[in-house]
Image (cartoon, grey):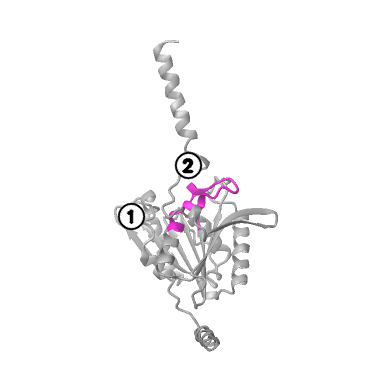
Amino acid sequence: MNKITKILILFIFLIFICICGTKADDYIYDDPLNLINDAKISQHYYTYKGTKIYYSETYENQDKEAPSSIILVLHGGIQRSNEHIMKHITNPALQSLVSYVRANKVKVLIIAPQYPLAVDKKHYRYPQKYNNVIMQLYKDKIKQYNIPKDRFFVIGTCVGGIALNNLLNTYSDFFSKAAFVASKTIDYSKFDKKKFKTKLYFVQGDRDSLKTRIAAINALKKMSVKTNLEVLKDTNHARTLEMDVGYPDKMWKWLFKYEYTSYLEILKIYCLKLIKKIRH
């Protein structure tokens, strides 16, 4: 075997390693908050109509005397994983969210499902059956913790934005607020115009198909959908998804601003406080 042949074989081998070594299942992720070992975050699985999903859950500031909110965190394609391998824990959206709610003492139940490697390659989206399971899980948690209707939130990043879009197609009048970060696409054609009430927030880099996103947002405004757009300057798709870039406090503040807390809820909180004081 001559020198040129050896070099050629080595070159082919290196290409093979590069291709195979970057599969979603082999990717090495950052976990700056060390959430994988966080005692407050628990891992579970949930089955609905024969389909199983794995997910993480944390109820932050649960003892705070205030009505709770719930948020569903849908990760991007790079965090896809086989079954119980919980790669969604490294989702920058989840990392940023946990950091924000702990710093600001927000009472919220966080549900972060793990999407599998399976994906509809034609449309590059997660199979609908997984969204059906996730929504059933979400509804069960709402019932379990008696969460007010105006506090049903969801955020989707990258391909998770497509999953969020699909949820809004099916559940046009369900969520109170939804946030898209560097979403792959925005398809509003199937939104139920009569029922759609979800307020939307978009974070998009100016180097990440911004023109098509603005066109979609303008169309949504014509449908009387309330929207907010945060444009990140000199920012591409990958950079937008980073924890310190695409998840500004401004977005989280918007998400957790409770505009529709009823007077009855407020009265209930103060009554509970009064009862505790009397007992002590």
Residue at horizontal 50%, vertical 69%?
A: 108
Q: Is residue 233 above or below residue 12?
A: below
Indicate left or right for 79 with 7 as reference: right
Note whether residue 159 is visible: no
In this rendered view, identify the residue nearer to me: 255 or 98.
Answer: 98
The disc labelled 2 sits on which kind of residue? Answer: Tyr
The disc labelled 1 sits on which kind of residue? Answer: Asp
Alpha carbon separation for disc pair 1 and 2: 27 Å
Note whether residue 74 is visible: yes
Residue at horizontal 43%, vertical 74%?
A: 257
In this rendered view, identify the residue nearer to me: 128 or 69.
Answer: 69
Residue farthest toward the left in the current orientation of the protein: 234
Magenta run includes residue 141 = no
What label does residue 206 carry, if any? 1
Residue wearing tag 2: 27
Magenta run includes residue 94 = yes
Magenta span? 74-95
Q: Is residue 203 above or below residue 107?
A: above
